[in-house]
């Protein structure tokens, strides 16, 4: 019940945000280039086809605190929606010291309900694929991320923000694969500094 109340309050806050925002600052065709760097926290691994494995959380993921960095470029479709692309590098280490690297390449759609010229608040959905390497294994996986980014612009063009949310990758095997029951979703929570340049 507590989670439901918190989720409801978060949605209510997001719905109320546009009421406090001034008229749109951006015009169709304006662009934003962003550089990110930060850390990521392993939150869960869900083995959805194996009830015995279930969902592993926090320390049970056997992954360490990791890092991430990315570049993105977007253009305004209208006054509120921004579309573009992003390339990212994410890494974590397992308990055994083995490196897990993820390189997502995604389409990126941002909704900007608050834009005052000095302060922006964006809600972003990334969808695409990630090249993943762990130990000697390599594979291509579906990737999605949902993040929020408040940004303060200290000049007409340059701004600094903080981004967080949830990054998801899926490792899915077909029925004829011996790893069928090892199909899993992995969730990471990023906390990144974002340097933005708008034009």
Image (tube, helix red, strand yellow):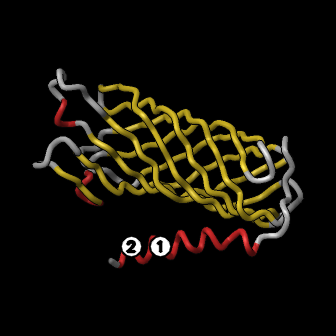
Measured along the vertical axis of the image, is residue 155 above or below residue 51? below
Q: Residue furthest top?
A: 176
Q: Nearer the viewer, residue 181 or 130?
A: 181
Q: Quadrant of the N terminus?
A: bottom left
Question: Within 10 angstroms of label 2, few (less than 14), some, or many (20 or more) residues?
Answer: few
Residue beneath the point at 71% across and 57% down: 112
Q: Are marks 1 and 2 in contact (CB under 8 Å)?
A: yes
Residue beneath the point at 67% across and 46% down: 35
Mark 1 element type: helix
Residue 12 x, y percent position in the rendering? 56, 73
In the image, 16: left or right of 133?
right
Per the model, the C-alpha gap separating discs 1 and 2 is 6 Å
Residue beneath the point at 27% across and 41% down: 184
Corner quadrant of residue 156: bottom right
Residue 66 x, y percent position in the rendering? 43, 51
In the image, 150: left or right of 184?
right
Q: Which residue is mark 1?
A: 8
Residue 38 x, y percent position in the rendering? 55, 54
Q: Which residue is mark 2?
A: 4
Q: Residue furthest left?
A: 52
Q: Residue furthest right?
A: 156
Measured along the vertical axis of the image, is residue 167 above or below residue 11? above
């Amino acid at each position: 019940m507590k989670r439901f109340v918190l989720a409801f309050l978060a949605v209510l806050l997001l719905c109320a945000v546009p009421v406090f925002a001034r008229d749109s600052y951006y015009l169709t065709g304006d662009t934003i280039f962003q550089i990110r760097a930060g850390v990521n926290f392993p939150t869960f691994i869900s083995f959805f086809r194996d009830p015995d494995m279930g969902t592993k959380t926090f320390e049970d993921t056997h992954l360490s605190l990791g890092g991430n960095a990315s570049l993105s470029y977007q253009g305004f479709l209208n006054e509120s929606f921004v579309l573009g692309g992003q390339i990212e590098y994410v890494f974590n280490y397992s308990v055994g010291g083995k490196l897990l690297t993820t390189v997502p390449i995604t389409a990126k759609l941002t909704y900007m309900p608050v834009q005052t010229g000095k302060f922006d608040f964006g809600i972003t959905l990334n969808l695409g694929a990630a090249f993943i390497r762990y130990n000697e294994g390599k594979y291509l996986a579906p990737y999605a991320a949902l993040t929020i980014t408040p940004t303060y612009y200290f000049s007409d063009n340059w701004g600094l923000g903080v981004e967080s949310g949830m990054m998801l990758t899926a490792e899915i095997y077909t029925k004829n694969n011996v790893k069928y029951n090892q199909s899993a979703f992995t969730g990471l929570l990023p906390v990144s500094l974002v340097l933005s340049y708008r034009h």
